[in-house]
Amino acid sequence: MRFVELSGEAMSALLDGDLSAAGRTAGVTLTEYFVTDQARWLWRYRLGQMDADPGHARWMVRQAVVGDEGTVVGHAGFHGPPDEAGTVEIGYSVAPGFRRRGYARAMLTELLRRAAAEPAVTTVRATISPDNVASLATISGFGFVEVGEEWDEEDGPELVFEAPARRLPPA
């Protein structure tokens, strides 16, 4: 798996529903999954973050690409740069046609490696709906510990998990 940066230009094209332009800009072929209402909410939100501080762009969403053909199976990234305590929050999503094939674990592994490589990052956070059995199973075995609960305006109740950034994920 490799990650391909999704630039502001590509996100803007996705907001406009222009998969062709977004794919040309990103250098990969994107599917309808990337122009759903939920995806558009994410692109709008990330563009707002990047507008507020362009330096945060390197922490934002990436396309998760597999195989020689460059198949895009989902997206992953951080919700922003590390906070003052050194915590970053991860996010990842696998397109429905590619679920249950290990791609979420591969994305999580790569995100944890990237976090561990950043000196300012000490802790990695994941927030997951208590009903999201698949995501809860995905983080098991990676050293995450439940540390609390929170209310997300978009997603409702979420469990909060954290893991040390320096801990290497399983192979």
Image (spheres, rainbow, N blue to C red):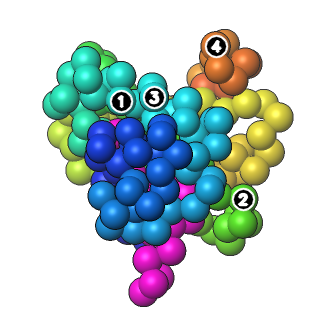
Q: Is residue 67 visible?
A: yes
Count of marks overlaid on the render: 4
**Tag 4's secondary structure?**
loop
Amino acid type for the residue under numbered disc 3: Arg
As shown in the figure, which amino acid type bears the numbered disc 2?
Pro
Q: Which residues are magenta?
A: 60-75
Mark drawn on residue 153: 4
Tell me where residue 139 appears, x and y as whole percent.
62, 48
Q: CB of mark 1 within 8 Å of CB of mark 3?
A: yes
Mark 3 lies on residue: 44
Tell me how far mark 4 sits from mark 2, CA to CA: 24 Å
The residue that label 1 is drawn on is 47
Confirm or deny contact between disc 1 and disc 4 (CB under 8 A). no
80 versus 144 height, above or below: above
Q: Nearer the viewer, residue 112 or 141?
A: 112
**Label whose residue precedes the other's in the sequence (1 or 4):** 1
Residue drawn at x 52%, y 46% is 17
Residue 73: where, in percent of width, then height? 56, 65
Residue tagged 2: 96
Callout 1: helix, strand or loop?
helix
Q: Amino acid at mark 1?
A: Leu
Nearer-the-camera pick, 146 or 46: 46
Tell me the CA gap for discs 1 and 4: 18 Å
Check disc 4: other Cα within 10 Å, few if <14, some if 14-19, many if 20+: few
Whether residue 67 appears in magenta in the rendering, the answer is: yes
How far is the residue under mark 3 from the one under mark 4? 15 Å
In the image, residue 7 lies at what x, y percent? 29, 46
